Image (tube, coloured by chain):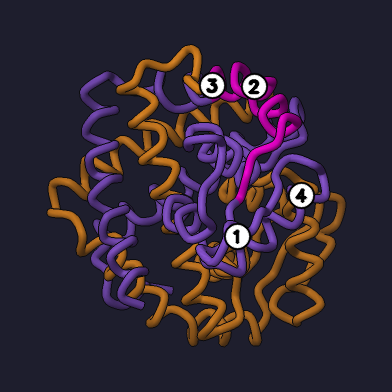
Chain colours: A orange, B purple
């Protein structure tokens, strides 16, 4: 069946991009799970918190950075809390913080070398430096649009 | 924490690409789910089968096209069978076919226009034709590597 509204060229561009992104995230997660038991979402939360001052961020900031809705972040943090990787802490009247724990930091530090090797092997080293930069610039353009669209929804 | 083994430029390229792909697939699936109750994986299976001769493909072919492992495809087909969207049919000694049903085809046809509009809005129309072509070419390079790696695993 044809996809109304997209030219053959646009449809080809979409399909190869979508197949690539689905397979890439699957393979990256397989390596993470096998070695450290972390999902892509776990890794994102731990990496973002580990780089925040005092390892903590307000939930709305974490939602914004990860691009998740509040309910998805809350489910994610509940699962991670039960494994001792993060805590939620109320901060006065200013909302709730997510905080990385010692155990979360240790899990991240253990996962980083293998994850980084896999990112290099499956993504970075496939491309020339110019291709990598151009791809990232285009990804940033798409991401900006997605965020603007989400903010206005 | 720094990611050993990636330069700042490579890490920036990876992060923006990964954030983009996570947010894009989430948003695309939200639209599909809201309008037709299909996941990205459901849509992929239905679209691939609808374009195959007689709406049927051997499971290993479907695995190869979707980039999934056999166990993942089997779980996916079980869920879709229970909703009447696909059938599994044994074909002599030559393995098993996945077959799209009338109901599956109707669900796909209902989903296509809204899905296509969302793909255009969030992806195709954000880029110039040149950017789109270059992005797809780079995605194809990464995808080829992922498939070769998977085949050799």
Residue sticking out furthest to the front: B92
What subunit carries mark 4? B
Q: Are marks 3 and 4 in contact (CB under 8 Å)?
A: no
Mark 1 → mark 3, Cα distance in angstroms: 24 Å
> Quick one: which residue is furthest to the top in this view?
A5
Image position of B25 (left or right of B12): right
- The residue pinned by badge 4 equals B81
Residue A41 visible here: yes
Q: Which residue is mark 2?
A: B109
Label 2: chain letter? B
Select label 2 or label 3 by which is in front.
2
Queried whether the magenta region covers residue B110, the answer comes back as yes
Q: What is the spatial separation of the Cα atoms under label 1 and label 2, in whole angstroms? A: 22 Å
Element type where label 1 sits in the image? helix
On the image, numbered disc 3 is attached to which residue?
B116
How crowded is the residue under tag 3: few (<14 C-alpha within 10 Å), some, or many (20+)? some
Q: Residue at x 85, y 57 (%)?
A: A92
Q: Earlier in the sequence, mark 3 or mark 4?
A: 4
Q: Is B35 positioned to the left or the right of A37 in the image?
A: right
For the residues marked 3 and 4, what is the alpha-carbon distance in whole angstroms?
Answer: 25 Å
Which callout, 4 or 1, points to the residue nearer the camera? 4
Q: Secondary structure at mark 3?
A: helix
Q: Position of residue A91 (x, y in %)?
A: 81, 60
- Tag shown at residue B73: 1
């Amino acid at each position: 069946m044809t996809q109304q509204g997209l030219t053959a060229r646009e449809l080809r561009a979409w399909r190869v991009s979508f197949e690539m992104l689905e397979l890439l995230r699957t393979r990256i997660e397989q390596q993470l799970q096998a070695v450290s038991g972390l999902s892509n979402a776990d890794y994102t939360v731990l990496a973002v918190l580990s780089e925040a001052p005092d390892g903590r961020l307000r939930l709305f900031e974490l939602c914004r950075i990860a691009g998740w809705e509040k309910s998805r972040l809350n489910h994610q943090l509940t699962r991670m809390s039960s494994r001792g990787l993060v805590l939620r802490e109320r901060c006065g009247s200013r909302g709730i913080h997510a905080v990385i724990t010692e155990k979360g930091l240790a899990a991240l530090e253990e996962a980083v070398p293998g994850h980084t090797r896999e990112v290099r092997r499956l993504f970075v080293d496939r491309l020339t430096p110019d291709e990598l930069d151009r791809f990232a610039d285009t990804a940033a353009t798409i991401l900006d649009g997605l965020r603007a669209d989400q903010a206005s929804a």
